[in-house]
Image (tube, grey):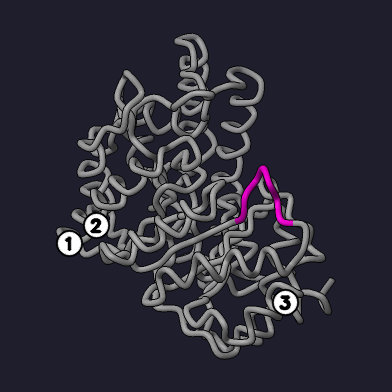
Amino acid sequence: KILILSLLFSFLLTIQCKITSTFIPAVFTGFSKDGFLDASIVSKQAAYFSSVSIDTVFIAGTTGESLSLTVSEREHLTELWMEQALTHNFSVIVHVSCESILDSRRLAAHAQKHGASGIAWFPSVYNAPGSFSSLAISFQEVANEALSLDAFYYHIPSRTHIAPSLLPELMSVLSSGSISNFAGVKASIDSAEQTALTQQLFSFSSGKATYFSGSDATILSTYLSANVRHFVGSYYNFNVLLSRRILSLADSSLSDAQVLQSSFSSLIHAVSSWGSSVSPDSLPLKELANLLSLHDSSLPFVGPPRLPYLPASKGAVEKLFSLVHSWCLSSVPSSERPPFCLSILSK
């Protein structure tokens, strides 16, 4: 495994990524009650992110229900976020994956035209590429539409089912210099072991490449064992302060950092279990974000999910509230409770 991954990332020696943020929220896409894009939500999200010193956002990704949006909606969403970027001095990474390569190219060119900082792409999840050459050529076509932006390969095998055996050959092609703006990888890998193994190989880049970990539950382990310094996640929409605290303690008080990471992970697993058992057709984290917004006025309400996802029932949301209340009360140290906990426990 290490040998294969070593070959995979050897190309990073010549790469320089312009995005340096530590915690980047994978932003929810806000919809109105009738299921249409709600432009007013973006400014509220941006205001909250600015208030907690977030300076980079990842838009229209998996959390943002990207493939449920039309291309026109995704372009409009990019334009809305770029308006906020000017106001709040954000960097914006635009996810451009589509089932049609032409649509992905269109979104990449649009992101560059409107001043985004980066794009992220994964291949079709329906007509999945069967060879590294097909995958590499597809990525090259998309990246070439936005040569002034950082281009990231979005490794999310739970959706793309891309075989690991394809990646070394793909990266070998990319290392030839044919994609001059290739800047690294965003990897949504649940296993801390896999993430750590992957990150060991970024030492070959001498710090010139960026690896974005997409696992909220393994912040501390990947930071310590794999020198990961960049994270993209859904929970940073409302819990970035606790995440920062974990890293701030990692070098000075490891045992305290471990307690906080364990607490954070317990919330993540509990919400995931709630979603699987109580409301299997919902988007658990969007439900959680909306629930928290009812108790913490600084957090924006982000609206319902779009079909095929369904809003959770009133009873399911009540169970979710009970879960969060219990977590705030007994699972997170009282001195480290995030603001939404203080609001929930005060009522």
Query: Residue 290: within the magenta?
Result: no
Q: Which residue is rendered at x = 34% and y = 40% of the image?
A: 73
Which residue occupies the foreground of this view, 339 or 51?
51
In this orientation, does residue 130 appear? yes
Which residue occupies the foreground of this view, 172 or 245?
172
Q: Which residue is mark 1?
A: 86
Q: Is 262 placed left or right of 116 in the picture?
A: right
Q: Which residue is mark 2?
A: 82
Q: Position of residue 53 (x, y in %)?
A: 28, 59
Q: Position of residue 200 (x, y in %)?
A: 70, 76
Q: Which residue is rendered at x = 40% and y = 33% of the image?
A: 289
Q: Position of residue 308 (x, y in %)?
A: 53, 24
Residue sticking out furthest to the front: 102
Mark 2: secondary structure: helix
Residue type at numbered disc 1? Leu
Q: Which residue is rendered at x = 28% and y = 65% of the image?
A: 113
Report which quarter residue 162 is drawn in. Answer: bottom right
Residue type at numbered disc 3? Leu
Magenta stretch, main secondary structure, is: loop
In this orientation, does residue 335 appear? no
Residues rendered magenta in the picture? 123-129
Which residue occupies the foreground of this view, 85 or 301?
85
Q: Position of residue 198 (x, y in %)?
A: 70, 70
Report which quarter residue 153 is drawn in. Answer: bottom right
Gap between marks 1 and 2 measured at Cα: 6 Å
Q: Which residue is mark 3?
A: 8
Mark 1: secondary structure: helix
Gap between marks 1 and 3 measured at Cα: 36 Å
